[in-house]
């Protein structure tokens, strides 16, 4: 009895999924960086 792993998804599907994930990650990082920077500017201004 041997283990046969399932086939991987086709390459174009994998690239599309990776691209969407990367785009979402970059967008989230940009938003959090902007919010953090804005918070720091407000904190410094109120000091």
Image (spheres, helix red, strand yellow):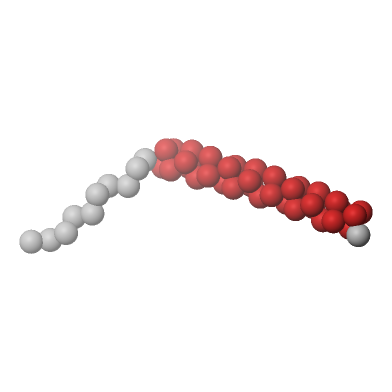
Across the whole image, how many numbered discs are drawn on residues?
Answer: 0
Measured as percent of width and height from the top left, residue 12 is found at: 44, 38
Q: Quadrant of the C terminus?
A: bottom right
- Left or right of 15? Residue 4 is left
- Left or right of 16? Residue 6 is left
- Left or right of 37? Residue 27 is left
Q: Residue furthest front?
A: 46
Measured as percent of width and height from the top left, residue 11 is found at: 41, 42
Q: Residue at x 37, y 40 (%)?
A: 10
Front residue (pair 29, 23): 29
Q: Residue at x 59, y 42 (%)?
A: 23
Q: Quadrant of the N terminus?
A: bottom left
Question: Compared to 28, does 1 lie above or below?
Answer: below
Q: Residue furthest left?
A: 1
Measured as percent of width and height from the top left, residue 2 is found at: 12, 61
Front residue (pair 14, 26): 26
Q: Residue at x 32, y 47 (%)?
A: 8
Q: Residue at x 23, y 54 (%)?
A: 5
Measured as percent of width and height from the top left, residue 44 is found at: 89, 58
């Amino acid at each position: 009895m041997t283990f046969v792993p399932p086939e991987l998804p086709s390459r174009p599907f994998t690239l599309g999924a990776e691209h969407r994930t990367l785009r979402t990650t970059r967008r989230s990082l940009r938003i959090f960086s902007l919010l953090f920077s804005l918070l720091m500017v407000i904190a410094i201004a109120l000091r």
